[in-house]
Image (tube, rainbow, N blue to C red):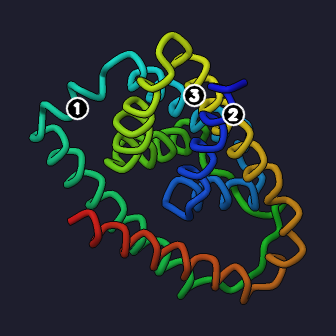
Amino acid sequence: MSAFLPGLFLGLSLIVAIGAQNAFVLRQGLQRHHVFAVCLVCALSDAVLVMAGISGFGALVTALPKLELVMTLAGAAFLFVYGLKSLWAAYKATSGLDPAAREAGSLTKTLATCLAFTWLNPHVYLDTVVLLGSVSTHYGENRFIFGLGSITASFAFFFALGYGARLLAPVFARPVAWRVLDLIIGVIMIALSIKLL
């Protein structure tokens, strides 16, 4: 527990911040579209990245600054386009949330978007691979227990966010609430894009 709990709490502190990936999971949860698959992909991606960091991949990422530049530019472009799409949706929205009436995107397209939010975000590498990887070295042979704590935080957070979003469904039945969410998501995405650049 002396390694698991610090991993759990550090993992939660890194993942709770409002970001592109969390906004996407919240949106999918509100729409009730492919929630389990989206939460699972996000959590498994974090697990892979955390284990890579603990296994020493963080040193490789640090040694290849051009990789970081490419990931930063691709991530910024993706976030900017998605932000514009959200702002357009806020402008055009005329109805509230009715999960039964909304058409779900295909699972393939949804998961591709989810993977892009995860793997094109350079901050994910800094948080999971570099930061958690370096902190884990303080736990010696228990570093994988530390990593397990962080992975547990990811699974708990993403599934709580995805399925907990249903509690907000009555609020988002009103058109104005949905427009405000799209507006906030659009502003966050574009701001993150600019910050990356």
From the image, tell me which residue sits under label 1: 61
User: Image quadrant for the N terminus?
Assistant: top right
Query: Residue type at mark 1?
Result: Val
Q: Secondary structure at mark 3?
A: helix
Residue 37 appears in view: no
Q: Local crowd at mark 3 within 10 Å, few (<14), some, or many (≥20)? A: some
The label number, if any, that marks residue 5 in the structure image: 2
From the image, tell me which residue sits under label 3: 44
Question: How far apart in space, not on screen, are marks 3 and 1 (Cα)?
Answer: 20 Å
- Residue 176 place in picture, x, y as percent: 72, 89
- Name the quadrant containing residue 71: top left
Q: Is residue 190 above or below residue 39?
A: below
Query: Residue type at mark 2?
Result: Leu
Q: Are marks 2 and 3 in contact (CB under 8 Å)?
A: no
- Residue 134 place in picture, x, y as percent: 37, 31
Q: Is residue 184 above or below residue 106?
A: below
Which mark is first along the chain, 1 or 3? 3
Which mark is first along the chain, 1 or 2? 2
Q: Are marks 2 and 1 in contact (CB under 8 Å)?
A: no
Q: Nearer the viewer, residue 132 or 99?
A: 132
